[in-house]
Amino acid sequence: MKKNIVLLMLFIANCAFAVTGNTHSKQPVIGGSHGAKLDTATFATGCFWCTEAKFQQLKGVKKVVSGFSGGHVANPTYEQVCTGTTGHAEACNIIYDPAQISFDELLEAFFVAHDPTQLNRQGNDVGTQYRSAIFYHNAAQKQKADYYISKLNTEKAYKSNIVTQVVPYKAFYKAEDYHQNYFNQNGSQPYCKYVIQPELEKFKKVFKNKLKS
């Protein structure tokens, strides 16, 4: 199913190219000239440990920072966010080189990295802090996110409609240091071993041609 999502997104992107003659009118390029500067994507796909571990694998991703976005409390702690009362989602700032990986490709990874049809949960992780969300940094990112969600729903890529929030990026609060690079430093921890590791292996198989060497 996850590989099928990638193939469908590639088909959708090619159709957009065929209709417009280029990808700039419907899907503007995001980033500096010739990838001269790094860009940021901010995604929430459930537990940020899992999100971080997956996006760290992709070629062109320079850094992944785990934190919180979309809430109404400044500088929240992990314990506060876990109560579900701060309005934040566990999210990751994904700093990437657009000369090596495009926002479209990151969106492909986003839709494979989790189930975007689950409302306020991912698997056994339940609560608004585990919601699916794209916090867009500019109009181009919003346009692309809306475009792919609409097309994936139209093509019935999933059994249910996508519930991913597409909302403007306003603030991002970095999580405590022990949350950073969590899977790589805690691989033997039960949650990492039995939840993240199997998901990560599936993710790597889908994107085997886009992984860092």
Image (cartoon, rainbow, N blue to C red):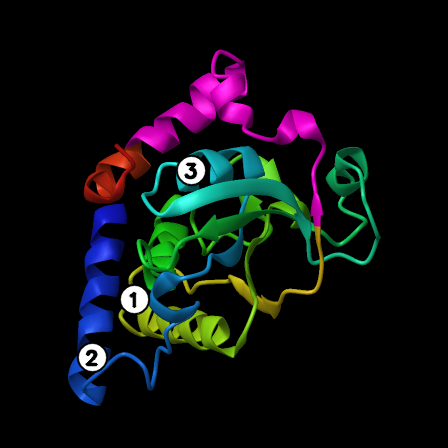
Provide the residue designation for mark 1. Answer: 156
Magenta span includes 199: yes
Question: Mark 3 or 1 closer to N-term?
Answer: 3
Residue linked to disc 2? 17
Q: Name the residue: 47% across, 70% down.
A: 141
Q: What residue type is labelled 1?
A: Lys
Q: Name the residue under label 3.
A: 56
For discs 1 and 2, the disc positioned in front in the rendered view? 2
- The amino acid at mark 2 is Phe
Q: Which of 61 and 53 is in front in this view?
A: 61
Which quadrant is home to the C terminus?
top left
Q: Is mark 3 on a helix, strand or loop?
A: loop
In the image, residue 145 lies in the stretch drawn in magenta: no
Q: In which quarter of the image is residue 138?
A: bottom right
Q: Which residue is drawn at 37% across and 59% down?
A: 98
Real-space Cα separation, disc 1 to disc 2, in angstroms? 21 Å
**Mark 3: few, some, or many residues within 10 Å (few <14, many ≥20)?**
some
